Image (spheres, grey):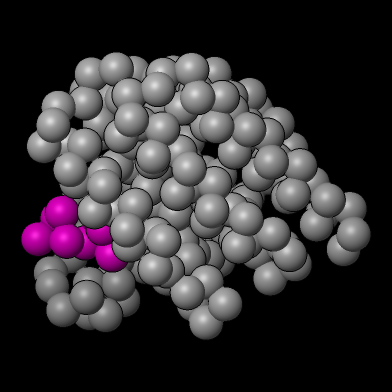
Amino acid sequence: MADTAYEALREQLLSLQIRPGEPINDEVLAKSLGMGRTPVREALKRLEVDRLVVSYPKRGTFATRVEITDLAYVSEIRMQLEPLAAARAARVATPSIRAELAEIRERVGAFDIERAGVTEILACDAMVHRAVYRAAGNPHLEDTLIRYNNLATRIWCLVIDRLPRLTEHVHEHFELLQAVIDGDEDRASELARHHIEGFEAAVRSALFAA
């Protein structure tokens, strides 16, 4: 139950359905999820570790604010770790993992981004990134990257309706998956770095244009 609550609340926080800075009432959330308050409270503790919520004594729990100044910090870390994970995945992924990545690549290739909603786009993006992290075979690297990818996703959601390059964004995922499947470490690393650089540049451009 705690895992279910965690997944549901995380998605609401990432997609900004729970707005940054919004107070979180565990009783209301428990009713909306059809469960007791205990699993929701356990989920909120995990989300606090993920820096998606913050608790203050005598004040309660709130969704963390999305600070645009964090974009540079988050991107700096991802710029180092995403290429590392992609290269490692290309090197160590097992045949069964490569087969899973091939299936995901086909799903990405068939994804109709022009008709997709924000939730579907976010799900597709998360599917690719988490698959590559998992393929890298380092659970500590995977956990770290998931956490920073989540923080980047919240920033992305602030401007996603102003980004014109989402088709290209999805195509980059297709190429990255192919490089990992092919075992091409250098190309996988290069594509991952390019993807993160493009993400930061696109978000900054949208923010300054606002």
The one of 154 and 62 positioned closer to us in this rendering: 154
Q: Position of residue 9 (x, y in %)?
A: 33, 62
Residue 182 lies, with reference to residue 31, above or below; the image says above
Q: Is residue 13 visible?
A: no
* In the displayed structure image, the side of residue 48 where residue 199 appears, left or right: right
Query: How many tags in the picture?
Result: 0
Residue 74 lies, with reference to residue 80, above or below; the image says below
Q: Residue at x 56, y 24 (%)?
A: 190
The one of 26 and 2 positioned closer to us in this rendering: 2
* In the displayed structure image, the side of residue 188 where residue 41 appears, left or right: left
Residue 81 lies, with reference to residue 37, above or below; the image says above
Q: Position of residue 209 (x, y in %)?
A: 90, 59
Image quadrant where residue 24 sits = bottom left
Give the main secondary structure of the magenta stretch.
helix
Q: Residue at x 9, y 61 (%)?
A: 1
| Range drawn in magenta | 1-8
Q: Is residue 15 magenta?
A: no
